Image (cartoon, rainbow, N blue to C red):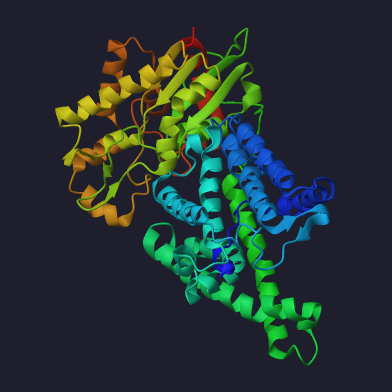
Amino acid sequence: MRGACRWRSSSTSEEQFYLVVPLLIIAALTYAHRRSARTAGFVVLALASAAWASTIDLGSPGGQAHAYYGTDVRMQALALGVAAGVWTGHRGRGGGLLRARDRRDPLDAGDRRLEILGWVGLVATLAGIALIEPLSDWMFTRGGMLLTSLAGLAWIIGCAQRVPTPLVRLHANRLAVHTGKISYGLYLYHWPIYLWLVRAFGHGHVIPLAVATLVLSYAAADASYRWLEKPVIKRGVRAFGGRRAGGAGAVGLVGVLVAALAIPAGASTAAHEVSAPQYPRYVAHIPTLVEGQATYTPPARPLAVTLYGDSVPYFLAQRMPKDNFSNLVVTNAGAPGCDLLDAPVQWTATRQQPNDAPCREAKATFGPTVRSSDSRLAVLMPTLYLALRHDVDGKVLWLDDAAYRDLITRTLTKTLTTARTSGAAKFAVTTVPCRTIDELQVPPEYRGDFDKFPQLVAEAGHPKRVNAIITAWAKEHHVPVLDLAGAVCGSSYQPTRHGITLYDDGIHFSPEATPMIWGWLAPQIVSAAR
């Protein structure tokens, strides 16, 4: 029954937890002689971790990775779990265990308040799963992780009581109990299985991917429990040899080998997703993007700048050769795949693309990022999505519609206002550079619909109308325009410059071209910040 209530944190802090927390528990049992004192120590540790998490800067990918994976942040959930274990499991000097069915054990007392607490925790946890967006700022900066951990802990305590309450009976069915028994295997196997499925079939179909991951993970965890974990629990290392082990030992050994192959594969992919690739900090020779362009002169004092937009500014900031542009401190506020507009992109008659959770999070944290980085200048790089159709309040609109053009200008004004109220003394906007539709790698299922709108295809390749809207808005609001389209495209599309391919995938500037883009952009930024 209690196996159905297992709960573990799925973070990379697990290794540190196994190494450090047993020592903390031994210390608590040795030096704290009252159960309340032992419990209080871990509660204080959880509160300290939550307070520390609120100081982490979420404005950069490194800060986000720290907040999500750091042991110092994750400790708040782990410490609460340990506090509950100490509270329910030990008493007296030396940490002696309470006997079964002892009324002094909170889980044996049949306390109605624990039953209510468990139901509240169950509802709150399910609501959190459904409603909380990934990497929501308040989860890390305002105690959200601590609150959700308390909800999960309340649920666990309620369903772990050793009396047949309604909540306990709900978790006592055979499927729930068996799932609890194999839960650690589910935790271990689901990630490499998910990565393999994504590699094979992509991210496109979320529900089938989730179902397939669940089914395969459950099967792998069940097999591991039956033929690897149980034999080892019963016979230790003898499970891998001898006549008594038989087929179970062989199967267990195969399981170990599979896990050994699976874990590095999953870990390497995860590390690739989290860690940014390394790009040179200094480039000896940077060709000019535009003949006669201004030369970069370092400002007398460090100039803090926030670059905001989609994946184009994101990769520009990530690949910037920083040592070539001393005293220019760039904060990356870009979000891959993020549309400037809040309305969904209408790719085809039946396919839409709304802003995903990381995009919404980037928009919500734009102001705090400008403020925390103390940026003097915020530079908005509008996205190519502006050249595509959008679903605006149930109507599919494009640049031909006044309501759509008005939406663009209102969004530009909103971004300007956010930057200024967040402390940026200056604001600048770039134009959207040209591409070719063949390089954009439009999915085949979208191409047929695209071909029905030659004006849309032309605008996506060379967004003249979008740039006209941006330029007119900037003039009205006295905002400097950094004409990236003019610098990159000139009078016509140019796929290479000085033998360097401009785009590596039709959208993002290639790593080789990025220093050349910065050679033109950096002087423009310094000028706009004056």
Residue at the (46%, 21%) spot, across then down? 290
Q: Is residue 341 left or right of residue 323?
A: left
The image shows a total of numbered marks equal to 0
Image position of 365 (left or right of 247): left
Q: For this rendering, which residue is in front, 435 or 69? A: 69
The percent position of residue 73, horizontal first and vertical second, equals: 63, 40
Image quadrant holding the N terminus, namely bottom right
Q: List the single residue furthest toward the bottom.
A: 243
Residue toward you, 36 or 476:
36
Residue 250's place in the image compared with 316, above or below, is below
Residue positioned 48% across, 74% down in the render: 175
Q: Position of residue 445 (x, y in %)?
A: 28, 57
> Is 279 situated above or below 327?
below
Residue 340, compared with residue 252, is above or below; it is: above
In the figure, is residue 480 to the left or right of 158? left
Q: Residue furthest front?
A: 103
Residue sitting nearer the eye, 22 or 433: 22
Query: Is residue 513 shown to the viewer in this render?
Result: no
Q: Where is residue 60 drawn, in percent x and y?
A: 56, 32
Quadrant of res 229: bottom right
Task: Tell me the residue at 53%/69% (across/down).
Answer: 217
Q: Is residue 362 visible?
A: yes
- Residue 137 placement (x, y as % from top left): 49, 35
The residue closer to the viewer here, 84 or 466, is 84
